[in-house]
Image (spheres, rainbow, N blue to C red):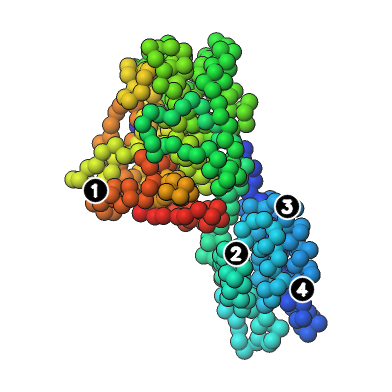
Amino acid sequence: MTDLHPAPQDLLPRTVRRRVKIGLVAGGLGTYWPQFPGLLPRLQESARYVSERFRGMDAEVTDVGFVSDAQEGAAAAERLRQADCDVIVLFLATYLTSSMVLPIAQRSGAPVLVVDLQPTARMNHAETDTGDWLAYCGQCPVPELGNVFRRAGIPFRSVSGWLEQDAAWRRIERWVAGARVRGALRHARHGLMGHLYPGMLDVSTDLTLLPATFGSHVEVLELDDLRSRVEQVTDEEVRERTALAREIFHVDGSVAEDDFAWGARVSVGLDRLVDDFGLDTLAYYHRGLDGELHERLAAGMILGATLLTGRGVPTTGEYELRTTVAQLVTDVVGAGGSFCEIQALNFDDDVVEMGHDGPAHLGNSAGRPLLRGLGVYHGKRGWGVSVELDVRPGPVTLLGVGQDADGGLSFVVSEGTVVPGPLLEIGNTTSRVDFGRDPGEWVDAWSATGVGHHWSLAVGHRAGDLRAAADLLGVPFRTV
């Protein structure tokens, strides 16, 4: 399915997301400044470098400057509280006392990352006096803060390294990715349209849980909210949408023109629905009966849902609210994310075959995906156009959002590799994933986590970013 056609996702406008908001404060013990006059300017120069590195991460940075005592730390805490940050970074330029920064962690309303980056990889001992040494002393208070944070009931996380160390900045960037997820979920509006797929008890989600856990909003919608918008779509808009679809997809000969036009009409209506309600995600399902209008609406959503997902608005069937959240998370960290479940196991090749009918993420595609006409949807009422997409070979990460006996949510993650081989040609997103172990054993371990039977399949190995996100969100992280 590969060719020289432009990447499917490149043909769509991407959703403009809220930038991650980072609060930054640097500090050191003011007692040193009169003792070693050149020390503070040197540390402030390091703090400026750190600030610029964060600004280069497409972040909105609230830099409250350099604090030298507890009073300045309390004033910084108030400024950072007002900034409503997704994460607070404490840059320990040299030793400081825990009393200087504890108020920041307590009052700012955001998780805190402690960063200590000494000037170079090592000191030149023969030419280092006490003032020079103190510039290397940012690690000294890290255990102190770890102790005090624990006693205060504040989660502690830190990155230690040197100022221009790539490895340290990669670890920091994971926390920024996690903060990006935290910010996206805090402000997300999740659409939920239709009703639960009958009998799928694992899919059922307490709607209060998302605002309580993440701060998200759940907008409960009716199929008629979509119907009224689809009815307003013009024939010219349908022609424009089918033309766009022909640019993005191969259109198989099995596609009936009437079904194609209907999918395009529903797609335009979906775009209006998302815009009118300001949605960041949409999960839907409607069973329908005897070809009535609502059944046709639900059956006609696959094209539009795939286009929305490719734009960065995950739109998912089977009323899968939690999996739509998972897809938003993986998309926010730049890894795409298609709706996914287990399809079969191949014990000869040691791979798990997984995918799903319906919406896919165009950014995951191995090439130009296919629109296939289906006379019947398996397990659902209706018929029409479906998307067939092969996930490109290479590393992938699964993220499921599980719900436990106490009602709490969890992030469940597994990393694997998509490998080439024969795939289904039935209008599904499909992939063959090698997890480096017997596929049956992997299924047993994955299922024991409480993940549920759907998840997001994202490109790249992203467990580090997702672990950081779970930590900042305060939810359990499980890996298989």
Residue at the (29%, 28%) spot, across then down: 425
Which badge, 3 or 4, is on the more N-terminal residue? 4
Location of residue 216 (image quadrant): top right
Where is residue 427 shown, x and y percent of the image?
34, 26
Tell me how far mark 3 sits from mark 2, CA to CA. Answer: 20 Å
Which element is circle 4 on? Answer: loop
Q: Where is residue 312 in the image (x, y as percent from the top left)?
A: 54, 36
| Residue neighbourhood size for the residue with mark 2, other residues' Cα within 10 Å, grouped as few (<14), some (14–19), many (≥20) | some
Give the residue drawn at x 73%, y 52%: 83
Kindly identify which numbered label has been placed on residue 440.
1
Where is residue 145 shown, x and y percent of the image? 62, 72
Query: What residue lies at 29% left-to-right and 40% top-to-bottom?
Result: 353
Q: In 3D space, how far apart are the residues under numbered discs 2 and 1 (Cα atoms)?
A: 40 Å
Give the distance between the C-alpha atoms of the residues marked 3 and 4, in whole angstroms.
Answer: 21 Å
| Pointer 3 with pointer 1, Cβ within 8 A | no
In the rendered image, the quadrant that contains the C terminus is bottom left
Q: Which residue lies furthest to the left in this view?
A: 348
Q: Earlier in the sequence, mark 2 or mark 4?
A: 4
Where residue 83 is drawn, which disc sits there?
3
Q: Nearer the viewer, mark 2 or mark 4?
A: 2
Question: Identity of the amino acid at label 2?
Answer: Ile
Residue bearing the label numbered 2: 154
Q: Identify residue type, mark 1.
A: Gly
Mark number displayed over residue 344: none
Q: Which mark is residue 69?
A: 4
Which quarter of the figure is the N terminus placed in?
top left
Q: Which amino acid does label 3 sit on?
A: Ala
